[in-house]
Image (cartoon, rainbow, N blue to C red):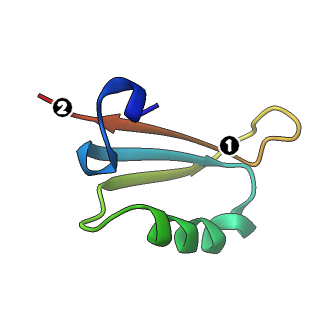
Amino acid sequence: MLKAGGATFDDVVMFRVYLTDTAHFAELNATYGEIVPTPFPARTTVYVGLPAGFLVEIDALAVIE
């Protein structure tokens, strides 16, 4: 989606992560650290009920000129 909008991970200023299970938080952090370049953008993680079968939902706010 970032690429389609003309952006990259470097343009992301904030992620919002929605998890269905607190047990997945450590795995989320490990994966986030591997994929998202430093300096890390702001991130909010909340625990929610998602539709059956969904474990995580993520949205990103990117700013481009």
Rendered view: 27 above or below 57: below
Q: What amino acid type should be assigned to the residue bearing mark 2? A: Ile
Q: Quadrant of the C terminus?
A: top left
Rendered view: 47 above or below 61: below
Q: Position of residue 60 (x, y in %)?
A: 41, 39
Rendered view: 59 above or below 55: above
Q: Badge 2: few (under 14), some or many (20 or more) residues near its Cα, within 10 Å? A: few
Residue 39 appears left or right of 44: left
Disc on the earlier residue, 1 or 2: 1
Q: What amino acid type should be assigned to the residue bearing mark 1? A: Val
Which element is circle 1 on? loop
Q: Position of residue 41 (x, y in %)?
A: 29, 55
Q: Position of residue 43 (x, y in %)?
A: 39, 54
Q: Badge 1: few (under 14), some or many (20 or more) residues near its Cα, within 10 Å? A: some
- Residue farthest to the right? 52
Residue 61, image quadrant: top left
Residue at 40% across, 61% down: 36
Residue 58 appears left or right of 7: right
Name the residue that disc number 1 marks: 48
Name the residue that disc number 2 marks: 64
Residue at 75% across, 39% down: 49
Marks 1/2: CA distance? 30 Å
